[in-house]
Image (spheres, rainbow, N blue to C red):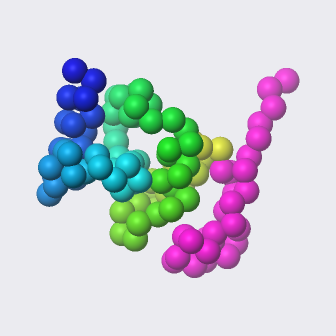
Amino acid sequence: MANTLLEELARRYIWWKTPDESLSDQRYFLQHAMRRCLFNDLKILEQFFGKEDFIDALQHPTAGIMDEKSWVYWHWKLGFDRLSRRCQLKSNPLNCQWTKHYSFAP
C-alpha cells in the first residue's frame, strides 16, 4: 500500500516516465514533487523522505523544474529565511549562498 501511494504521486508528477524510472532518481522526483505537491501529498512524502532529502533536492536544483513560488516556499519551509542578494539577482541557483534560519521558542 505504501509504495502504491508513492507510485501514484510519481505518475502524477512525472507522467512521461514510469513510476520506477521517476523514483529511481530521488532528487529529480523530489524536485518535481516540491513543485507540484498538494498538502495531502506532502504528508505522504514526509512518510518516505526526511528533511535532509528535501534540503538536498533544493540545494542541487535541476534547471527548469522549480518555479519561483515553489522555490521561495521550500526555502521558508526548510528554514532558509534569506537568500544572498547575489542569488536573488542571478538566474543560476547554484551561485546561492544559504543562510540558515534558527528560531527559538520563548
Residue 44, relative to residue 53: is it above or below?
Answer: above
Residue in view at x 55 percent, y 59 percent: 59
Residue 76, can we see it? Answer: yes
Residue 87, position as x, y percentages in the image: 63, 72
* Side (left or right) of 12 relative to 47: left
Residue in view at x 72 percent, y 50 percent: 100
**Total numbered badges shown on the rendered structure:** 0
Residue located farthest toward the right when viewing the structure as drawn:
106
Residue 52, position as x, y percentages in the image: 56, 42
Residue in view at x 51 percent, y 35 percent: 50
Residue 36, can we see it? Answer: no
Closer-to-camera residue (17/87): 17
Residue in view at x 34 percent, y 53 percent: 25
Q: Magenta includes 85?
A: yes
Residue 5, position as x, y percentages in the image: 24, 29
Residue 101, relative to residue 60: is it above or below?
Answer: above
- Rendered-image quadrant of the C terminus: top right
- Rendered-image quadrant of the N terminus: top left
Closer-to-camera residue (65/7): 7
Residue 45, position as x, y percentages in the image: 38, 34
Q: Quadrant of residue 48?
A: top left
Residue 21, relative to residue 37: is it above or below?
Answer: below
Q: Quadrant of residue 66?
A: bottom left
Q: Magenta includes 100?
A: yes
| Image: magenta residue range | 80-106
